[in-house]
């Protein structure tokens, strides 16, 4: 716990400095936050505390990255709340995936890995007019921002999707008093919000602020410049994106708004950088004292020695790490080189690293300059070496590459992986894997063009249990599409690898670390042995070999899975949860990094502060049993 102890000491020093800083700021961050919450509480919104940054109930996220995450079930119609209006200040971390601000941290004035999102929500209560009016009054009448520095964007429509421009919102802003030349339409990229590939979505309207006070800055909105920044995003959830990619109007409409506390605090205090507020200045003071380096001066383009950039990165990461630790998440060990902080206590944690990790880091750093000059890509053969020689999981390789601002040559990695497997005389199966790796995008495009419906794979969860035995019932369904040796055909005969898409299936494709099913597809005159199942954006492709007869599009087949394999995966999947729970109980705190479940074994990668010595291992085994 020595590392977290250093963070705590730095936080204590920062707290004392922050108290002095607040007295100098007209709008301290605490006042900004409280004003927002109280404003919406007075308008009938229920104050909901921030959820932890670990999304315990959402396996699709590594971290909570938006205020709406804890209300996702409401938007999906899975849960209900006792209130129709809500407000919150949500802790958010954005370090990967679609919302990833890691690369920008320290180099600009407003991106952070950790931030607070001030939000308000309406669950089928009010809609566009009220939401816009509430936001405008708070900014102009409570926070006293000058209206002539505010710009509005709205959804300008999309002809390809048959979506009209949101003229209703445009007119609402005009009625509020915003001049027409400050109300600007944008397309899907900027002003249509979607939760994911499928699910609730809708147009949004954003409020942008001109930090410089230009006579007119409409042309600078959404350019990514630092002098005209987005303050508030107001989303109107009124559609659902279906699995066939079409949009369907929702019977219930929701409002989801979000505004960054850091940006708002800087704006209200007339600062051009979020780092010039009480959210960061105290941390800079603590860093200066701990490192003995010159004080932070706020330089960007003229930061020749990158010292101020290092200050910003470290301050940002200290905030993120502190919150993550407090919520039960473990950080990776990254050297704080630029400030040369003395950290001998980190050596005490080195035995907790993934085996081979330090060797892998040395491989990367030894060739970093060369790769930086070649498109900042980690070559596929090197990624495979990290995987094959040092035993690093591909997800961890991507994390390492991201730390050093590299992208992974994914195609090169999988090519090297496939070639290595081919050398182990698994040519037939590996040709299949290589095909599905490199043709997924084209396959998905072809399927959409052919209007093939998404596979109904809900039957994979259906089974019967009696007398201590599980029974997985076969499914009778229709053949919709056949691939033979990579080509789409109407009928498959003879040798070669075939892929089959059905209307429905009970086959489980690999997901969540658990390997997929194998089994058979049978008609009255044919038999196909299925050796692999792939999910291509909702289309389940059954790959295998035709053993008897022929298979035609339109045939009715019966799908039967290998029950022994499924049972092995189920048992090991449950065992992995038991082991993870036991380690957490014995060591007091742990964080799962990755897992893999197969029919005959599983592995679980966890990070703990307590070494897993023989005593801990024995206690863990006893608890699992």
Image (cartoon, rainbow, N blue to C red):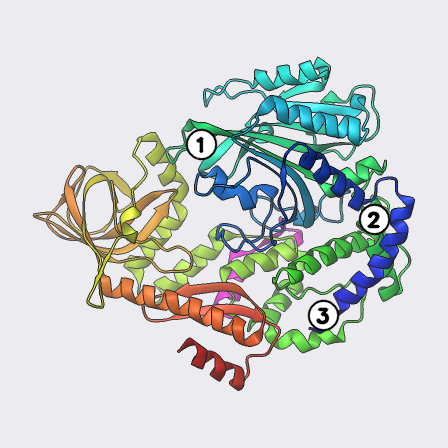
Give how far across and how far down residue 617 sits, in percent: 49, 81
Query: Residue 557 lies in magenta, yes or no?
Result: no
The numbered dot on residue 3 is 3
Q: Between 587 and 38, which is closer to the camera in this rendering?
A: 38
Spatial CA span between label 2 and label 3:
24 Å
The first of marks 1 and 2 along the sequence is: 1
Residue 21 to residue 488: above or below: below
Q: Secondary structure at mark 1?
A: strand
Disc 3 or disc 1, which is closer to the eye? 1
Q: Which residue is mark 1?
A: 240
Spatial CA span between label 3 and label 1:
45 Å
Contact, mark 1 vs mark 2 (Cβ under 8 Å):
no
Graded by Cα atoms within 10 Å as few (under 14), some (14 to 19) or many (20 or more), the crowding at tag 2 reads: many
Residue 134 is drawn in which quadrant?
A: top right
Give how far across and how far down residue 563 sits, in percent: 23, 62
The numbered dot on residue 278 is 2
Residue lying at the far left in this picture: please name it: 525
Can residue 367 be seen at all in this image of the molecule? no
Q: Between 5 and 521, which is closer to the camera in this rendering?
A: 5
Residue 560 to residue 273: above or below: below
The first of marks 3 and 1 along the sequence is: 3
């Amino acid at each position: 716990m020595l590392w977290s102890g250093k963070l705590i000491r730095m936080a204590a020093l920062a707290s004392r400095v922050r108290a002095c800083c607040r007295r100098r700021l007209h709008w301290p961050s605490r006042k900004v936050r409280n004003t927002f919450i109280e404003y919406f509480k007075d308008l009938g919104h229920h104050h909901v505390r921030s959820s932890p940054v670990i999304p315990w109930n959402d396996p699709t996220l590594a971290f909570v990255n938006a205020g709406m995450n804890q209300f996702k079930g409401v938007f999906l119609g899975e849960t209900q709340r006792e209130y129709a209006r809500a407000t919150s200040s949500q802790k958010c971390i954005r370090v990967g995936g679609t919302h990833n601000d890691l690369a920008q941290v320290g180099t600009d004035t407003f991106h952070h890995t950790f931030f607070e999102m001030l939000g308000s929500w309406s669950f089928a209560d009010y809609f566009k007019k009220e939401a816009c009016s509430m936001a405008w009054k708070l900014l102009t009448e409570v926070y006293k921002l000058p209206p002539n520095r505010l710009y509005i964007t709205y959804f300008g429509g999309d002809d390809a999707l048959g979506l009209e421009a949101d003229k209703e919102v445009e007119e609402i802003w005009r009625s509020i008093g915003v001049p027409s030349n400050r109300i600007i339409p944008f397309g899907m990229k900027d002003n249509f919000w979607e939760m994911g590939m499928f699910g609730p979505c809708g147009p949004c309207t954003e409020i942008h602020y001109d930090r410089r006070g230009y006579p007119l800055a409409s042309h600078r909105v959404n350019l990514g410049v630092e002098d005209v920044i987005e303050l508030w995003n107001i989303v109107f959830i009124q559609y659902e994106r279906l699995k066939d990619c079409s949009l369907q109007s929702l019977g219930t409409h929701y409002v989801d708004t979000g505004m960054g506390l850091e940006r708002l605090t800087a704006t209200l205090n007339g600062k051009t950088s979020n780092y010039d507020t009480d959210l960061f200045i105290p941390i800079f003071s603590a860093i200066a004292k701990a490192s003995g380096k010159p004080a932070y001066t706020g330089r960007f383009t003229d930061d020749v020695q990158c010292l101020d950039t290092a200050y910003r990165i470290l301050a940002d990461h200290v905030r993120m790490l502190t919150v993550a630790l407090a919520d039960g998440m473990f950080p990776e060990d990254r050297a704080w080189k630029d400030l040369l902080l003395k950290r001998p206590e980190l050596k005490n944690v080195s035995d907790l690293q993934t085996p081979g990790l330090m060797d892998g880091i040395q491989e990367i750093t030894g060739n970093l300059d060369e790769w930086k000059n070649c498109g900042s890509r980690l070559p596929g053969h090197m990624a495979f070496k990290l995987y094959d020689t040092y035993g690093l999981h591909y997800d961890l390789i991507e994390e390492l590459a991201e730390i050093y601002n590299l992208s992974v040559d994914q195609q090169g990695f999988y090519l090297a992986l496939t070639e290595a497997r081919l050398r182990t005389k698994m040519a037939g199966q590996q040709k299949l894997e290589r095909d599905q790796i490199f043709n997924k995008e084209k396959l998905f495009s072809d399927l959409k063009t052919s209007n093939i419906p998404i596979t109904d794979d809900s039957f994979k969860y259906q089974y019967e249990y009696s007398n201590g035995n599980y029974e997985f019932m076969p499914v009778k369904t229709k053949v919709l599409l056949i691939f033979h040796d990579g080509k789409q055909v109407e009928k498959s005969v003879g040798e070669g690898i075939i892929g089959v898409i059905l209307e429905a299936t009970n086959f489980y494709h690999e997901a969540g670390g658990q390997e997929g099913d194998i089994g058979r597809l049978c008609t009255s005159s044919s038999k196909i042995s299925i050796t692999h199942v792939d999910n291509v954006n909702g289309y389940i492709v059954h790959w295998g070999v035709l053993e008897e007869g022929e298979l035609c599009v339109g045939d009715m087949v019966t799908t039967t899975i290998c029950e022994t394999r499924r049972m092995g995966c189920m048992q090991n999947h449950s065992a992995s949860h038991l082991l993870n729970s036991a380690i957490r109980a014995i060591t007091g705190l742990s964080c799962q990094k990755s897992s893999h479940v197969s029919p005959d074994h599983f592995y679980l990668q966890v990070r703990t502060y307590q070494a897993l010595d023989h005593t801990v291992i024995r206690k863990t085994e006893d608890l699992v049993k």
